[in-house]
Image (cartoon, rainbow, N blue to C red):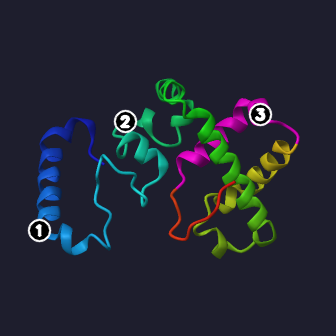
Amino acid sequence: MLAHDEKDEQAQKLIRVRESFYRDYGELLKDYVEFFDPQRYLYNSNLVANLTFGSPNREEFALERLPTNEHFLKFLEKAHLTTPLLRLGRDLAQQTVDILKSLKGDAFFFQQSPIAAEDFDSYGELVERMEKLKLHQLPKEDELKLLRLALNFIRPAIRCRLA
């Protein structure tokens, strides 16, 4: 990530290198490398990178801050994405907790999990609360956790069915 004051000159150089690499190797590597295309969803990037077209160059737009970023939340509301993202976060939490609850002591199974091992108990408690409450009844703190989980989601290479 480039610092904000370095971005113009170095960013232009990086873009030229990327364009040259794609021109020279794009066809050869298309089955192995997912090249950036602003018209397509990038399956090897998390959901937030797809929504924002890349990585942030300012702290207030870092993933961990987005669920509380007023501008981003307004964008999600305007685009009618808040509820679908909360549903995705809910489904990811429920399915992950259900699948990994008996394996929570084994770090291997958390390597590709949407929930980090150190956050598992917290999400387990959230899943229990969601059994008693509807999505729109959850406290703000729980909504933030679900939103953070959804925004960090990367579609797995093996497809999972989300309810």
Give the overall secondary structure of the magenta segment: helix
The residue under label 2 is which amino acid type? Arg
Decide whether residue 142 is among the magenta residues: yes
Q: Mark 1 and mark 2: span between their CA atoms?
A: 32 Å
Q: Image check: 20 left or right of 54?
A: left
| Picture coordinates of residue 120, whole percent (x, y) | 72, 57
Image: magenta residue range: 132-153
Q: Residue at x 52, y 36 (%)?
A: 65
Q: On residue 24, which mark appears?
A: 1
Callout in the foreground (3, 2): 3
Q: Circle 1 sits in a helix, a strand or a loop, which is it?
A: helix
Q: Check the image and report above or below for 41 versus 80.
A: below
Q: Image check: 139 left or right of 117?
A: right
Q: Circle 2 sits in a helix, a strand or a loop, which is it?
A: loop
Q: Residue at x 15, y 64 (%)?
A: 21
| Picture coordinates of residue 129, whole percent (x, y) | 84, 43
